[in-house]
Amino acid sequence: MIKKLAAKYSGELKLAVSTVAAQLLPMAVLPMIMRAVSPEGYGSYGLFHSIVSMAAPLLCLKYDTAVVTVREDKFAAMLAVSCVGLSAAAGVLALGVTAVLSFWAELPFWAWLLSPTLLFAGIFQGANGVCLRSGAYGRIAFSATVRSITLALTQLALAKLFGSTPREDAAALAAGAAVSYAAGSLPLLAPLLSLTGKYRYSTQNCSGYYICTKNILETMRKYIPFVRFTFPAAGAASVASNILSPVISLFYGSAALGCYSVAAKALAAPITVISNAVSQVYFRDVSQKISAKRMGSTFRLLVLLALPIYLLLFLAADPLLPRLFGQEWAASAWLIRLLAPLYAVRFVTVPFFSTVIAANRQQDALKWQKRLLLSVVLSLAVIFAPKAPFALLMVSYSLALGWCSIAFCRYNFKLVKKEEERYGTAEGQNFYG
């Protein structure tokens, strides 16, 4: 039985086990980092982190997702090159915007770190798409390990050396994040260079084993129908998932954002370690062959994992968090208990959101993500109530995001069943025929 499960979920297990190993050191040093920085400093870093998290999935305009589904290597190579170019353009744009804003207001130092962070985050996204295409799960896992260890060590070292005020704490943590993206990108470059290295670049000859700027742009235009709906859908999902941090910072202050960021980090750890591994492998599979039976077994596996994990976080938050991080972080414990149901729902449902994209129904994905964003934005309206308590905002946001996640997941399940009925499949219909 165990051997069958290991064979069935080999990709997921490889990513999950390596990611668990990658998280051991960060988990070990996290209490030291939290004792070295203030809630205000960590809250300011949380704002930096939310901006990067909001922008990172969009830096390649979702051509990194198209790379996974493209059948011909030459087109995949040109889209991979376009991802690198788009990442460089995003870095330059971020630097220009920061420079312009600095003439109007005094910016924190972490604002200047957005440019290199976005550059490497975009390269990371594009190279990760190439690795998913080739099934290089071991390299993805190794990249996650390198990135995680680098993040932990650099943030701890910089916080200890330079952190003394909230502004310096935030700058030290942001610098660690920038370095970690750069380090995490390095192991992914080999498959990227292997794919693009098959073709020589030429300014004139665009045929055969040559690629040129003209063909790159034509390939990008060719896949605009894919990106037209995928990009705004991903944008809506990204904003919906990260919009809470700026709102908390604006209406409740950096200290409140710091406590929320710690709670979110603890609750998101199982998603990073397990659910995201399942999601990456699942998307590659669903782009080729999948069935409702496979979806059902994956869903049951995630439910069985989510229940004990989030129950343990719910019960252990109050006694453990102040002991590990210090009494100034005690407020994060009740936030963990309050938000645990939402993150359990996200743990189970998010891996299935890519089904509509793999089924070539990007327009449906956009419709659902618009609903998700609208629901979240409406849930934030409670902040305008007189003396609205922080807990009310958390509950309102959780209900909106949780309900939409469940509804979208159900839609994806219905979609696969309809596709099976349409094609008369048994085990694994290829959506692309």
Image (cartoon, rainbow, N blue to C red):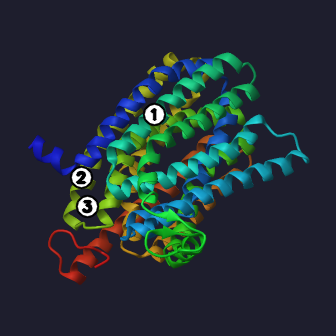
Is tag 2's residue or tag 1's residue first in the polypeptide sequence? Answer: 1
Select label 2 or label 3 by which is in front: 3
Say what amino acid the circle numbered 2 marks: Arg
- Marks 2 and 1, Cα distance to the nearest angstrom? 31 Å
Query: Hey, what amino acid is under mark 3?
Result: Met
Foreground mark, 2 or 1? 1
In the rendered image, which residue does mark 1 sit on?
146
Label 3 Cα crowd, 10 Å radius (few <14 / some 14-19 / many 20+): some
Whether residues under marks 1 and 3 lie with C-beta atoms below 8 angstroms apart, the answer is no
**Three-letter amino acid code at the position of disc 1:** Val
The quadrant the C terminus occupies is: bottom left
Q: Which residue is mark 3?
A: 295
Residue 229 x/y as whole percent: 53, 73
Residue position for label 2: 300
Disc 3 element:
helix
- Given this view, does label 1 or label 3 mark the residue nearer the observer? 1
Question: Measured from the top left, where is residue 250 in percent x and y?
Answer: 74, 44
* Residue lying at 64% horizontally and 22% vertically, measured from the top left: 158
Helix, strand or loop for disc 2:
helix
Residue lying at 65% horizontally and 54% vertically, measured from the top left? 88
Q: Is residue 13 left or right of residue 153?
A: left
With respect to residue 333, does 398 lie above or below? below
Pick whichever, 118 or 8, lies toward us: 118
Residue 172's place in the image compared with 233, above or below, is: above
Relative to the observer, which residue lies in front, 53 or 335? 53
